[in-house]
Image (spheres, rainbow, N blue to C red):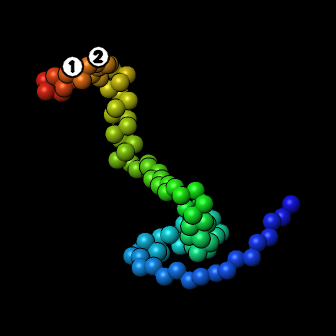
Amino acid sequence: MYILRSMKTSVLSIKIDEGVKKRAQAVAGSFGIPLSTLVNAYLVELAETQQVHFSAVEIMTPHLEKLIGEVEKEIAAGETSGPFETADEAIANLKSL
C-alpha cells in the first residue's frame, strides 16, 4: 500500500557552522540521503511527536581502549572499592584515597 500526500514546500534558512554542515553532509551522504531530506524528516518527527531526541555514540579510541583495559585488569585483580551500603561510606572511601 502506498500513501501519497501532496506537500506544500517552504524554504527554511538557518545559520550553521560551515564545518558542521560539511560533516553532516558527509554523514547523510554515507547513507545515500541528501542532508535536506534528513533535516525534513527530523522536523516532521519533531512536529508530530513534540519530542526532541539526541544521541551521542561513543567512538572507541586508542586512549579509551587503554583505559578500559586498565579498569578490566583492576577488576580482575580485585582492586576495586565497594559496594557501599550508604553514600556516607562511599564518601569516606573517596576521602581515604
Amino acid marked by disc 2:
Glu
Residue underneath mark 2: 85
Q: Answer whether labels 1 and 2 touch (C-beta < 8 Å).
A: yes
Instruction: Look at the image and tell me in which quarter the C terminus lies.
Output: top left
Image location (x, y in percent) of residue 11: 56, 83
Image location (x, y in percent) of residue 77: 33, 20
For image coordinates 44% across by 49% down, the residue present is 58
Q: How would you rate the neighbour count of disc 2 (Cα within 10 Å): few for under 14, some for 14-19, many for 20 or more?
A: few
Image location (x, y in percent) of residue 30: 60, 66
Q: Is residue 10 above or below residue 53?
A: below
For image coordinates 80% across by 70% down, the residue present is 4
64 sits to left or right of 34? left
Instruction: Look at the image and tell me in which quarter the N terminus lies.
Output: bottom right
Instruction: Measure the C-alpha gap from mark 1 to mark 2.
Output: 7 Å
Quadrant of the rendered image containing residue 72 = top left
**Helix, strand or loop for disc 2:** loop
Amino acid marked by disc 1:
Glu
Q: Is residue 52 above or below residue 12?
A: above
The front one of 52 and 48 is 48
The answer, for residue 30, to whether it is visible in the render is no
The front one of 90 and 13 is 13
24 sits to left or right of 4? left
From this viewpoint, which residue is outermost toward the top?
85
**Helix, strand or loop for disc 1:** helix
Residue underneath mark 1: 89
The front one of 74 and 20 is 20
For residue 67, which numbered disc appears in the image?
none
Q: How would you rate the neighbour count of disc 1 (Cα within 10 Å): few for under 14, some for 14-19, many for 20 or more?
A: few
For image coordinates 19% across by 26% down, the residue present is 91
